[in-house]
Image (cartoon, rainbow, N blue to C red):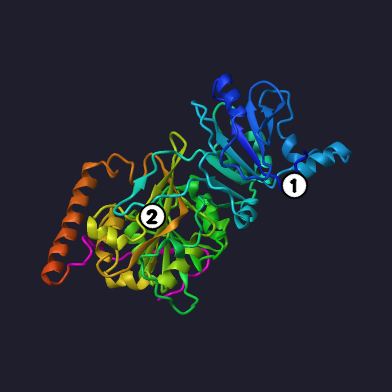
């Protein structure tokens, strides 16, 4: 039976398992594939072949030298009937997964794509994940790394020759090569749950708010993050609902990232006179401007294309003051992508214990909330996001979206991994103890009917941020 242009293609990477496991996997029918035909391309080391998985067509692709590895994607260049047939057989999107050492099928348990998402993924890269389970109190990492991904066929074809042959392929391999070629794409994710937030909050009141056109500024504190800044800014510039402004605030880097930021004419670059820490930077920007909302973003992370659209719609609908998303954590050293889940109702989670129920750089905040609690603790160089959250929870409504909208990079020498400021450092533990003690003191005061202490833990003087390039910002 001949495949059509609408037939998806799944690549089952069997290069790194014994041949007997690969043979057994080919002979098994995948349990979760849809009832219509679906091509499965199995990669191994020796030859082309064809077998059948149930009613599914299976192609075995050699990754050895001497074979036209990209012919199945390009469809040939000559106008003869054979190349025309190949072009008509090109799938609209590709799914990829690595065969487990025990023969485990990487697509088992994954939700099949919806028709609207299929249209989106043809020009995107997307992790393919099981449906999430949300904790009630604090963040929980998934016990399993993400093993499968989706991408538009043209994107895979453009980078196919550059994908590694000595290890499984990752979405980051593909993204890095596409960025090198300056080929446009967006980031999406498919986990089988609607990207709409409303159906997932049946127990949280959602007071409707009249439609409005709020203004949003995205803030990117930056210190020596040039290797990742382009990906970060591309994700913000290409949002389906673009921010009304994007500002990179350089924290005294030896050389500000002027040339890189200049690639994005809609992005403003401000510079600090010296290194003062991220909370002092963002607080100064909020004091100097007058946007309705502020979208946080770390310079070494990146956003899915619809992150702001979903955050803003949910904030306006529920009147949330601070709202985050679920996290996809990219551990750069082993190259693993790990889903991390957060409670949907952050206020309820913090009522149980002062844990870690929201990832600050995923979030969108109302300016009113920031000013109501006196802003960030500008005297802190790290931990200021937790300090702010544990104060804001007393006077603001705080939620998380059920959708993954943010890819966070775990890398050496960041604030959370550096030996002096990392999550396991003595300085971090001491600060966290002080922050939680203030939260417990406020709990006691609240029970006894006494005033709460919502002042920032440590404050530093205001600073002057120099406008280096880009559009002016909406002044207060």
* Residue 212: percent from left, percent from top: 49, 78
Image position of 90 (left or right of 32): right
Q: Is residue 246 above or below residue 151?
A: below
Q: Which residue is mark 1?
A: 5
Q: CA distance from mark 2 to mark 1?
A: 50 Å
* Residue 245: percent from left, percent from top: 50, 67
Between disc 2 and disc 1, the foreground one is: 1
Which residue lies most toward the left here? 448
Crowding near the residue tagged with mark 2, few <14, some 14–19, many ≥20 C-alpha atoms within 10 Å: many
Predominant SS along the magenta part: loop
* Nearer-the-camera pick, 132 or 471: 132
Q: Report if residue 392 is visible in the image.
A: yes
Based on the picture, tell me whether residue 219 belongs to the magenta stretch. Answer: no
Q: Residue 52: which quarter of the image?
A: top right
Q: Is residue 460 above or below residue 326?
A: below
Secondary structure at badge 2 equals loop
Q: Residue 440: which quarter of the image?
A: bottom left
Q: Residue 424: which quarter of the image?
A: top left
Based on the picture, tell me whether residue 458 belongs to the magenta stretch. Answer: yes
Boundaries of the magenta span: 453-476
Image position of 317 (left or right of 120): left
Crowding near the residue tagged with mark 1, few <14, some 14–19, many ≥20 C-alpha atoms within 10 Å: some
Q: Which residue is mark 2?
A: 251
Q: Report if residue 250 is visible in the image.
A: no
Q: Residue at x 53, y 47 (%)?
A: 111
């Amino acid at each position: 039976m001949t495949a059509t242009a609408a037939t998806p293609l799944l690549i089952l990477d069997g290069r790194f398992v014994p041949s007997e496991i690969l043979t057994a996997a080919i002979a098994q029918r995948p349990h979760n594939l849809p009832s219509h035909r679906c091509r499965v391309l199995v990669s191994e080391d020796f030859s082309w072949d064809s077998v059948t998985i149930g009613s599914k067509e299976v192609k075995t692709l050699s990754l050895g030298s001497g074979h036209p590895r990209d012919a199945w994607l390009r469809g040939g260049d000559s106008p003869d009937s054979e190349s025309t047939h190949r072009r008509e057989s090109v799938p609209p999107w590709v799914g990829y997964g690595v065969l487990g050492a025990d023969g485990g099928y990487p697509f088992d348990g994954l939700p099949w794509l919806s028709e609207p998402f299929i249209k989106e993924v043809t020009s995107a890269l997307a992790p393919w994940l099981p449906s999430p389970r949300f904790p009630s109190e604090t963040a929980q990492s998934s016990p399993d790394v993400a093993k499968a991904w989706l991408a538009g066929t043209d994107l895979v074809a453009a980078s196919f020759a550059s994908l590694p042959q000595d290890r499984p392929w990752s979405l980051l391999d593909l993204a890095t090569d596409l960025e090198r070629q300056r080929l446009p794409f967006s980031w999406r994710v498919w986990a089988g749950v609607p990207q709409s937030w409303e159906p997932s909050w049946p127990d949280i009141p959602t007071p409707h708010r009249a439609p409005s056109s709020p203004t949003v500024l995205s803030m990117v504190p930056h210190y020596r993050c040039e290797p990742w800044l382009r990906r970060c800014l591309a994700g913000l510039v290409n949002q389906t609902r673009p921010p009304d402004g994007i500002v990179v605030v350089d924290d005294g880097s030896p050389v500000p990232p002027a040339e890189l930021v200049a690639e994005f004419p809609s992005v403003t670059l401000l510079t600090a006179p010296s290194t003062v820490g991220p909370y002092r930077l963002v607080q100064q920007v909020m004091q100097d401007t007058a946007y309705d909302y502020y979208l946080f973003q770390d310079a070494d992370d990146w956003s899915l294309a619809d992150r702001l659209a979903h955050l803003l719609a949910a904030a306006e609908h529920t009147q949330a003051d601070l709202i985050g998303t679920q996290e996809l954590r990219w551990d750069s050293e082993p190259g693993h992508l790990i889903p991390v889940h957060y409670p949907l109702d952050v206020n309820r989670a913090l009522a149980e214990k002062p844990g870690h129920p929201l990832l600050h750089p995923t979030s969108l905040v109302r300016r009113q909330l920031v000013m109501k609690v006196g802003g960030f603790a500008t005297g802190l160089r790290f931990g200021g996001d937790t300090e702010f959250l544990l104060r804001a929870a007393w006077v603001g409504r705080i939620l998380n979206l059920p959708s993954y909208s943010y890819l966070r990079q775990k890398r050496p020498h960041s604030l959370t991994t550096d030996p002096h400021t990392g999550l396991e450092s003595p300085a971090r533990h001491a600060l966290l103890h002080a922050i939680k003690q203030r939260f417990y003191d406020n709990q006691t005061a609240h029970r006894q009917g006494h005033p709460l202490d919502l002042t920032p833990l440590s404050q530093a003087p205001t600073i002057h941020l120099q406008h280096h390039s880009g559009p002016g910002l909406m002044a207060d």
